[in-house]
Image (tube, rainbow, N blue to C red):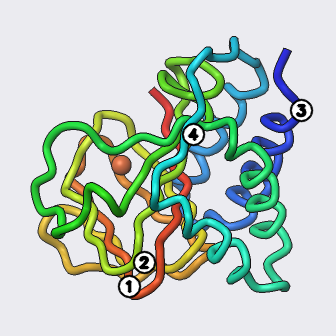
Amino acid sequence: MRIQALEELLGAARTAYYGRARDQKSISLLEQVFDALETPAPQSQFESGRLPVCRYLSDISLSLDSDDSDLRQLMRAFMAIEPALQWRRRQGDCTGASEGFSENHANAMLVGPEGLELREDVWLGVSLVGPNVRYPDHRHLPEETYLVMSPGDFRQGRNEWVHVANGETFYNPKSIVHAMRSSDRPLLVFWALKE
Ligand SMILES: [Fe+2]
């Protein structure tokens, strides 16, 4: 029922997330996410489409260290399915975003309400941000764990920015205001949420 490319991507995401998450809240969220994903849901009929910022994907892929075989496998699986994704710009409030944000970011959902696989219970997707861009402050009810594929800075509320290296996870509790920003390199981050 689920296409092979998505099955492979979800397996690679599970391996990388499980191998990398260190905090208990992330681990328990990830168990709920990947347990739910054992049951496939219908495919969407969304048209695929890229945005200009997607030109950075191959650089990010090439920048992964050969020691990080789980991240490389995840990126390989992602690049295989990426042409089928519908990349979108963030809609709505852009408080805190840097100039040029609109043309220099894109989001895509693998599974979720706007995903390749349509479901409400679990969201798994990616955000891609070009170099030197700050993503706006935003919040959502479900808790979330990021898996960072290229380094960037992350912030919750008015706290200090925290640098997160590639291969590390970052947990956002329910409803917390959060943001991210790239350095002089593009930023790619997976997100996993459970309703
Ligand atoms: Fe978020």
Q: CA distance from mark 3 to mark 2?
A: 31 Å
x and y, in percent, of residue 98 in the image? 18, 69
Which residue is at the far front? 52
Q: CA distance from mark 4 to mark 3?
A: 17 Å
Quadrant of the image occupied by residue 49: top right
Q: Mark 1 highlights which residue?
A: 183
Which residue ends up furthest to the right in the rendered image?
4
- Residue on which the image places disc 2: 152
Left or right, residue 51 beside residue 34:
left
Q: How far is disc 2 from disc 1 in space, using C-alphas?
A: 6 Å
Q: Measure the alpha-carbon separation of dots 4 and 1.
A: 24 Å
Name the amino acid, label 1: Ser
Q: Residue 5 sits in which quadrant? A: top right
Dots 1, 3 in contact, CB < 8 A: no
- Find the distance from the CA under tag 1 to the CA under tag 3: 35 Å
Tag 4 residue: 124
